[in-house]
Image (cartoon, rainbow, N blue to C red):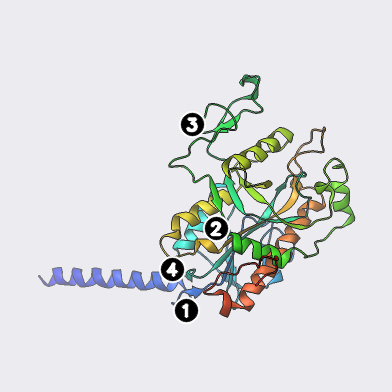
Amino acid sequence: MRNLWFRIVLALTLALGLGLAGAQAASPSGKRLPVKVVIVTTFEIGADTGDMAGEFQPWVEGWPLKHEIAIPGVRHVARYSDDGVLAIVSDMRGRTRESVAALILSDQFDLTQAYWIVSGIAGVDPAVASVGSAAWARYVVDADPIYELDERDMPADWPYGLYSNDAERPNVKGKAEGSSAMVWTLDKGLVDWAYGLTRDVKLPDPPGLQAQRAPYAGDPEGQRPPFVLQGDALGTVRFWHGAHRTQWAHDWVKLWTDGAGTFTMTDCEDQGILDVLDAHAASGRIDRRRVLVLRTGSNYSRGPLGRASLPHVFHGEGLKAGFDATFLVGGVVARELVGHWDRYATTLPTATPTGRSR
């Protein structure tokens, strides 16, 4: 009998000890860190500081984010500041979902009032904006649940071989039940406010960037010096490029937003991030209304009109300009939120009818 009681006591002691160890591992202070702004970047090229920057480094150095913290389920170490900004590297494509879910489910942070800024580079449609430009999304559209037919086998009157699940041809809205919401609408007042704060931000326009856009003489918006705009994001885990695919992206965004959206940026993660945020919104862990998506053009989604081209994502000044613009524009919004937290903690900012922020 004594042996039995000894085993029970030992088991309880071990269980309690493991529980305490887990709680200590969850947060260095044993308390959940309150977060005001979450920055989600998708990749970093090398180190977090001191070398060629990716998406993460401009935030680490520019804020700065001095403290490191490991989040179980997120492969790259996260960074945070004493004033309540947390930034992660989610990794790209499918890994993004895992990382964002791991962050939300972690007991290390209090995210209930946090604003989210998805901050990363993308391909930009030269009909809408230029490389180095920054677009605040009103809509995020998913293009992963899709039927794909080899163009060599498609009917002669089809524009391309991509079409919706449960549809019979392109440009017909199908279904994606159990797979995706297909389109997420971001809070209009918040997006307008962020745009109003940043629309006059001057973005770098070095000679190399001017040379990169020079061949796009047939695209007036694509030839403009970098600027801030409102424009929508299309997410696919596959990378695509070319005139026909850009036309498909334009049509796809119009289809799923019922004509309200304008395809501007193409990336590989936004659809996954918004899907995960929506899935956890009802839990009260996050506020889905407090989400912003900022994508910056590092390359064009197609070649100049009438000319075929290969994608040049990691080539030319566009890449650096895209990285720089993420913080130059997104940092303005983050600093306003943190600097006036007494106002924004409980009340979402909106823009006035004149476009001025309040």
Measured from the top left, where is residue 298 in percent x and y? 75, 51
Residue displayed at 49% across by 54% down:
276
Whole-angstrom CA distance, mark 2 to mark 4, is: 17 Å
- Can you identify the residue that label 3 sits on? 166
Q: Earlier in the sequence, mark 2 or mark 3?
A: 2
Whole-angstrom CA distance, mark 2 to mark 3, is: 36 Å
Q: Is residue 357 visible?
A: yes
Along the viewing direction, whichever of 134 and 168 lies nearer the viewer: 168
Whole-angstrom CA distance, mark 1 to mark 2, is: 22 Å
Taking 137 as reference, is 328 above or below it?
Answer: below
Along the viewing direction, whichever of 192 and 214 lies nearer the viewer: 192
Q: Are marks 2 and 3 in contact (CB under 8 Å)?
A: no
Q: Are marks 1 and 4 in contact (CB under 8 Å)?
A: no
Q: Which mark is residue 341?
A: none
Along the viewing direction, whichever of 339 and 66 lies nearer the viewer: 339
Whole-angstrom CA distance, mark 1 to mark 4, is: 12 Å
Foreground disc of the pair 2, 3: 3
Type of residue at label 3?
A: Asp
- Can you identify the residue that label 2 sits on? 75
Foreground disc of the pair 2, 4: 4
SS assignment at label 3: loop
Q: Which mark is residue 107?
A: 4
Residue displayed at 78% across by 51% down:
131
Q: Count residues near mark 4 (Cα–Cα under 10 Å), then give few for <14, some for 14-19, many for 20+.
A: some
Along the viewing direction, whichever of 315 and 234 lies nearer the viewer: 234
- Can you identify the residue that label 1 sits on? 29
Type of residue at label 2?
A: Arg
Whole-angstrom CA distance, mark 4 to mark 3, is: 40 Å
Q: Is residue 48 visible?
A: no
